[in-house]
Image (cartoon, grey):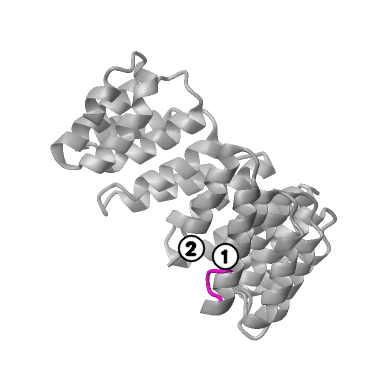
Amino acid sequence: EAEQVIHTIPSAAARAGPLSVLAERLGGSAGAEAAQAALAGAPDEADPNERGWLIVGLLPHLPEPARLTALAQLRSINDAGLRAPMLAHAARHLPETHRPALLADALAQARAIDEAETRAGALSGLLPTLPPAERAAVAAEALAAAATLNDDTQWGHVARWTAASLPPENLAAAYSVARALGPVEARAEALSALALVAPEANRPARLAEALQAAAQVPGGWDRAFAVEPLAGVLPPELYDLALSIGRTIADDWARSDVLAELSVNMPPDLKAAVLQEALAAARAATQPWPRARALTGVAAQLD
């Protein structure tokens, strides 16, 4: 029935996204047929970022000849900053014998990008697809490229993307840079990412410092985004600090969201109390869409 509805959509481009979801759900020959229809409907003039990731998502469901066509379409994307990570992610859907060559090609293309910001982003985007033994060197390259930009915000982004892959000697240096970043948003972002991968003995102090930076971030959602990455790993002695930061957020949806996230690993009694706070904040949202989303976030944490 869903497939019949999708095929009533007049625009082939508009059908492509729903068909890709359908292909994943159907599997088998029916999924392959839906995936090929989605690939045929992905227009060349579409946004290359959206079109490229759509093609990457279709690859596991395409038969071999169509998969080669899809790879050719990815290679035709002019923006190397987009093309390199897409090819690397595409490699995961190829036979084992073909993956190393495509990954090496993607890495070479990323390293060849002249503009440092784009190169840092492309190298960071490759990290999840690379063999573990290669990730540390590529992560260090990406952060080194970001360091040439004299842009604290961009450096903070790249630090977040690369932190989990950086070798120990680079982590220590990155932490020193992160503490000195000017914009508090960038400082909170980088400190949070680096705290999550800090040595176990240093982690509580690093998490506390990241929370203190998050407390200085203005705005509801920006502060929530600074706190939430830490929610699942906070030791009990930092619960009060994290909750106090969450409670200062004026936006009802954002406050509900961060309180619900913080409750995840708390002991049952405290979790129940915090979820009641989150539920009250969700119900206080005046607009239907934020209220619905906030209530959904609370529901996800309920037993």
Q: Position of residue 9 (x, y in %)?
A: 33, 18
Up/down of 248 relative to 199, above or below: above
Can residue 264 be found in the magenta stretch?
Answer: yes
Up/down of 175 relative to 62, above or below: below
Q: Position of residue 193 (x, y in %)?
A: 64, 64
Separation (CA) of disc 1 from disc 2: 8 Å
The part of the chain drawn in magenta is: 261-266
Q: Is residue 133 visible?
A: yes
- Please name the residue that numbered disc 2 is placed on: 301
Residue drawn at 66 percent across, 58 percent down? 159
- Please name the residue that numbered disc 1 is placed on: 275
Q: Quadrant of the C terminus?
A: bottom left
When asked about the image quadrant of residue 117, the answer is: top right
Q: Position of residue 150 (x, y in %)?
A: 81, 49
Judge left or right: residue 9 versus residue 209.
Answer: left
Residue drawn at 78 percent across, 52 percent down? 152
Question: Quick check: marks 1 and 2 in contact, CB under 8 Å?
Answer: yes
